[in-house]
Amino acid sequence: MPERTTAASQERITLPAVCDAHLHLRDGAVLGFLARVSARTCAHAIVMPNLDPPLRTVAEALAYGARIRRALGPDPGFTPHLTLYAHPDLTRTEIAHAAAEEGISAVKLYPHGVTTQSSSGVRDPLALDDLYGALAEANLPLLVHGEIPDPTADPFDRERRFLDEILEPLLERHPRLRVTLEHITTREAVACVRRHAPQLAATLTPHHLLYDRRALFAGELRPHLYCRPLLQRDRDREALLAAATGGEEAFFLGTDSAPHERGRKECAAVCAGVFNAPVALETVTELFAEAGALAHLADFTSARACRRYGWPHPTRLLTLVRRPWRVPDELRGDDGGRYVPLRAGETLAWRVLPDGEGAPT
Ligand code: DOR
Ligand code: ZN
């Protein structure tokens, strides 16, 4: 648990390893690199199924889990929790099978066409009542990407419209279905979660807590801050930060670290996704320290997700020290690819000590 001293005087924080409730590890040659980056600070992570092709069956998800474990080697101290990509042909039997598998934690709903790898997403999310009924019966949570799948919709309005036109009716029709609204971006989403908790919970990303949409257009266009759903107004960011730091059980960390190779971010058709895993915990710690909310940090980064998804609380402890360090301009994957982390080139205040260097003084 963080020591309860004032933010200004606190120089060292010890807290349990992170439970990242929303993470992209990709597949193939880059998988080992990305899994190691997250295993540095995470004990548990919910791993997204939007691979190419997406993970649609229990067998595909379990095979992916085996690839993650193989890429990490023995005793990584990191458990991937797998997800299935929602689709209209996902049967009740397959859902019951998924619920019985310890390695599978949820089904993820991607509305069609709203983000990376959503071309197989759901065109009419309200037409999946059988699926939601089966999930509620199996007590398997539904994770939702909350943007309306209407290609004519204003991209800055897509989350708000999703809340009104899809999520509210869905929750009403399926009161026993547990739902997590992923990577929320607006004050309306915060209010919606408060209204429907504990049926509804939400993940919050480091980048949506740190930036509003002005950062995307600061001087030049900043493709490395392009993600879906988009960064919103500062008043939205303030509402997200208040939700994160305010000690409420329904809000917890899901980094949505979503790397794309440098060439896919610096080009004419930029992929959505922010690679924040190398700085996620450091960034969140900085924000909580500034807000005077370090007493709630471990709940936000670890304990609430464990309670929500029924995972054992991590026994591994991390130590952060107030020691400036410079974030690299880019990192090299095992695939030879170049990956630009969030806050590249910036000097950060907090640093996670490598394992073994964190003994309390
Ligand atoms: O920005 C995003 N990137 N949002 C998503 O929902 C998907 C993710 C990705 O997979 O790159
Ligand atoms: Zn994501």
Image: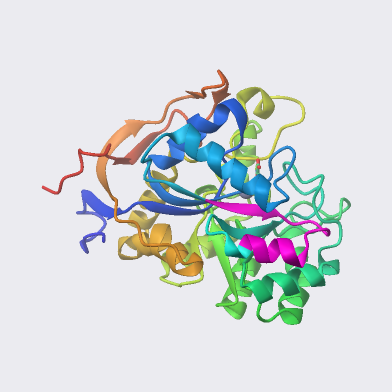
Any magenta on residue 89? Answer: yes
Q: Left or right: where does residue 227 sit relative to residue 23? A: right
Q: Point out the residue furthest to the top here.
A: 336
- Residue drawn at point x = 60 percent, y = 77 percent: 199
Position of residue 261 measured from the top left corner of the image (x, y, whole percent)? 62, 26
Residue 346 in percent (x, y) is at 42, 32
Q: Residue at x 49, y 30 (%)?
A: 33
Tell me which corner region of the image, top left, top right, bottom left or bottom right, holds residue 322. top left
In the shown orientation, is residue 90 left or right of residue 142?
A: right
Q: Quadrant of ligand 1?
A: top right
**How many marks are shown on the rendered structure?**
0
Please state the horizontal and vertical placement of residue 43, each as a whole percent of the image.
40, 50
Q: Is residue 101 above or below residue 212?
A: below
116 in the magenta segment:
no
Q: Is residue 105 visible?
A: yes
* Relative horizontal placement of residue 15, taking residue 222 as reference (left or right): left
Q: Quadrant of the N terminus?
A: bottom left
- Whether 118 is drawn above or below 347: the answer is below
Q: Quadrant of residue 357?
A: top left
Range drawn in magenta = 81-98
Residue sitting nearer the eye, 187 or 137: 137
- Along the viewing direction, whichever of 64 and 112 lies nearer the viewer: 64
- Residue 184 is at least partly visible in this image: no
The residue located at (51%, 71%) in the rendering is 250
